Amino acid sequence: MATKIAHAYPGQGAQFPEMGKYLSRKALQIATESFQKLITALEKQDKEILTETEFVQPAVYLVEASLMEKLPSPSLVLGHSSGEYAALVEARVWDVRTGFEIIRARGHFSASFAPKGFMVQIPSNSRQQVLGEFKSVYLAAINSEDRVVVAGVEADWKKLKEFLEENHVEYTLLHVSAPFHTPYMEKAAQRLRSFLEINPGKMPAISVYLNALKRVVQSYDDVIEGLTLGLTKPINWLETQEYLKRSEISTLVEVYPRPYLSKFTSFPTYNVSEFYHLTL
């Protein structure tokens, strides 16, 4: 049986200060023409700006778009959160420039039409305790069997932090500024839908799995629906891995300079540089 490979793209949270050095000439030109402030932040390795939604999502996308230039086509592409936009570009639903404008729009809508908020990773066995205590905090992601992410608005973070520490719950605060994958993102999601409707794409040349749909894309309407729902529905990365198994994918390649998804992915996962012997 032939080896079936899937490419996976991480989203916001995977950023790191030196990421700008991985931009290709093409990616650098696209960003320079329309978002010089982002290029300046990458050059200065400005950690504060590079945690803001409006900047970090297109920054991570540009790194991923640069790496995909060097890759052979896989059997399947997928992404985690905003990583799905890079996956759709590899599948040739959009070209790199259009994908950049769309991920910029997602970042803008998320920053402008959603409340400031937090996302925090906690043990799975603390999920019901936390959600039962805080009705305004929502499940945002099931990343692994033993870790989930919950999210809420900025005003709730102090009380939740106190609760976690008082109850000796281990937690990791994520480097994001909005409560993604919760109902708090509904206004941003509707604006994203409208933007996608006026920026049509092509049918995928490679199969694309979207987490919110729990299946591969069959039409551009699926893309619109999957990305819109993806802002307000929790990610289930466990279901994604089950889909990989059912599809007889043998290897998952994380397309990013540093390991991120592999930290919470039980499916056999390789970094793009080691798997394809790339010099980054």
Image (cartoon, rainbow, N blue to C red):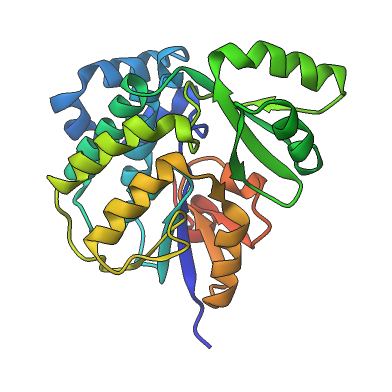
What is the quadrant of residue 156 in the picture?
Answer: top right
Residue 55 shows up from this direction:
no
Q: State the residue in front, 117 or 48.
A: 117
Q: State the residue in front, 39 or 149.
A: 149
Instruction: Say which residue appears at 29% left-offset and 25% top-offset.
Output: 108
Instruction: Say which residue appears at 77% left-offset and 13% top-offset.
Output: 162
Horizontal side of residue 102 vs 61, given as left or right: left
Q: State the residue in front, 58 or 31.
A: 58
Coordinates of residue 24 in the picture (x, y in percent): 28, 39
What is the quadrant of residue 164 in the picture?
Answer: top right
Residue 198 shows up from this direction:
yes
Coordinates of residue 53 in the picture (x, y in percent): 39, 24
Q: State the residue in front, 28 or 204.
A: 204
Residue 157, relative to residue 132: is it above or below? above
Horizontal side of residue 255 vs 104, given as left or right: right
Coordinates of residue 163 in the picture (x, y in percent): 78, 18
The count of marks equals 0
Residue 100, relative to residue 44: is it above or below? below
Instruction: Say which residue appears at 42% left-offset and 20% top-offset.
Output: 50
What is the quadrant of residue 280 in the picture?
Answer: top left
Coordinates of residue 54 in the picture (x, y in percent): 34, 23
Instruction: Say which residue appears at 79% left-offset and 34% top-offset.
Output: 129
